[in-house]
Amino acid sequence: MIYNSFSFIVLYPLIFLLYYIIPARHNKVRNIFLLLVSYVLYLQYKPIYALILLGVTAITWATALALDRAEKPKRVLTIGVLLALSPLAFFKYFPFINENISTVLSKAGLDFHLTGLNWAIPVGISFFTFQALGYLWDVYYKRQEAEKDFLTYALFVSFFPSILSGPINKASLVIPQLKGMRPLFDYGKVVEGLKFLLWGMFMKVVVADRTALFVDIVLPDYMHYTGLTCFVATILYSIQIYADFAGYSLMAIGVGKTLGFELTENFRRPYFAVSVTDFWHRWHISLSTWLKDYVYIPLGGSRCSKVRNYCNIFITFLVSGIWHGANWTFIVWGCLHGLCQIVEKASGQNKCDYGWLGKSIKITITFLIINFMWIFFRMPTISEAVGLIGHIFNPASPIMFEIGSRHIFAFIIMGVLILFVKDWTDEFKPNRFQLFNNHHRIIRWITYIIVLVMILLTGVFDAGQFIYANF
């Protein structure tokens, strides 16, 4: 469900009311209702792709059951993983592989190209596939019992708040909540969920979509702007992608809370990280955890030689880059993150503490490193990413900033500053500046009203897709 759309404003209150009309003792009926809602909402994107979601669900469910009685569980796991991954590989990566093979063969004088295979990628396929595979590996490693009820497992995979862009939830967190008795109505959890929804909406429509008005003009046409303007645009893109993705995650978690569910935390103020390693402890936490549990540790983790450990880190972030998209830019982006963490670990920077001044400097340096790596994530090709970086550092470029519309830019700065202050206080003064959770009711409600008014007056309501929905 696209949370910044009119359909969400209309449909979600109806879903909320119908869900709580069902008595709490009829837990099975509630789950069936949520499963139907999840599939109906998924069908609105491209109905035929709901079969892909159902297929991945059925394959991983049946494989997990087979693992319990298999004489050779590793073989069963391998077959199940390959079958579950095949839709993701076909829809997301086959066109990329086909294009690169065709390019190589054309340079050798051979004409080979499979046409008609550039279909749209099923929405959320990377997220629900990884979530299902995580469950499968947990069953294999005996960390999770195989779920015998197909409807419960199907709801775990397709739960509508998180299927579009995560978080990637663990079965050990969600399935017990689906099977356990949920209260008829938890007032405290609903209120908390609505706060998440409110702040997530602010991040998306006031910050992310406003900054996009500047970023999407400058970066695609960077040669016509000064280096300083392009640099500011890259910083705003770093803020855009954070506000967009973290905003979605907060809204997904908020919707889950209003229905009585706890979903995985996905962000923890990543731009206050003191290193790239620390950044990945704060950014897309559910994916970082998935990569650690199912790629890094099985490869050997840190319980091996230094060289092997560095290789494990590099491979893990190579997988991260590939997961994000079928493009060389994502692969380079993932490799750069892996290399930065190897350098940090080899130099011992992760263990250094330089006091508040040193920490401030490390936060600034880390943000700038992350910012320049985002350029490879944002630009369509490696050559354009390199060209943009070269243009920013071009000494011949005029030292001036082209602001464009002052009205639009003023709203952008205002939203970014509010986001920065909120994150700064949550990071460094969590007990002193509590606005959403202040013990004074008047302060809380003033905060709610101000944020809501800003959303209504300055938000960009074009139902723009969330960036990570493309992955």
Image (cartoon, rainbow, N blue to C red):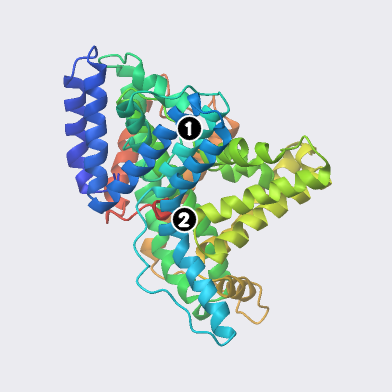
Q: Is residue 40 visible?
A: yes
In the picture of the structure, the residue carrying the numbered disc 2 is 89
Instruction: Report how far apart the C-alphas of labels 2 and 1 lie in the structure.
Output: 19 Å
Please, what is the three-letter code of the amino acid marked with disc 2? Ala
Dividing the picture into quarters, in which one does residue 339 lie?
A: bottom right
Q: Residue at x 33, y 48 (%)?
A: 52
Cβ–Cβ under 8 Å for marks 2 and 1: no
Return the x and y of residue 356 as percentages of the image width and height. 73, 37
**Mark 1 nearby-residue class (10 Å; few <14, some 14–19, many ≥20):** many
**The one of 152 and 391 positioned closer to us in this rendering:** 152
In the picture of the structure, the residue carrying the numbered disc 1 is 135
Please, what is the three-letter code of the amino acid marked with disc 1? Tyr
Q: Residue at x 46, y 48 (%)?
A: 85
Figure check: 409 above or below 398: above
Figure check: 23 above or below 123: above
Which quadrant: the N terminus? top left
Dividing the picture into quarters, in which one does residue 400 lie?
A: bottom right
First in sequence, mark 2 or 1: give its number: 2
**The one of 257 and 117 positioned closer to us in this rendering:** 117
Q: Is residue 441 visible?
A: no
Position of residue 118 in the picture relative to residue 420 (left or right): left
| Element on which disc 2 rests | helix
Position of residue 425 in the picture relative to residue 202 (left or right): right
Return the x and y of residue 370 as percentages of the image width and height. 62, 54
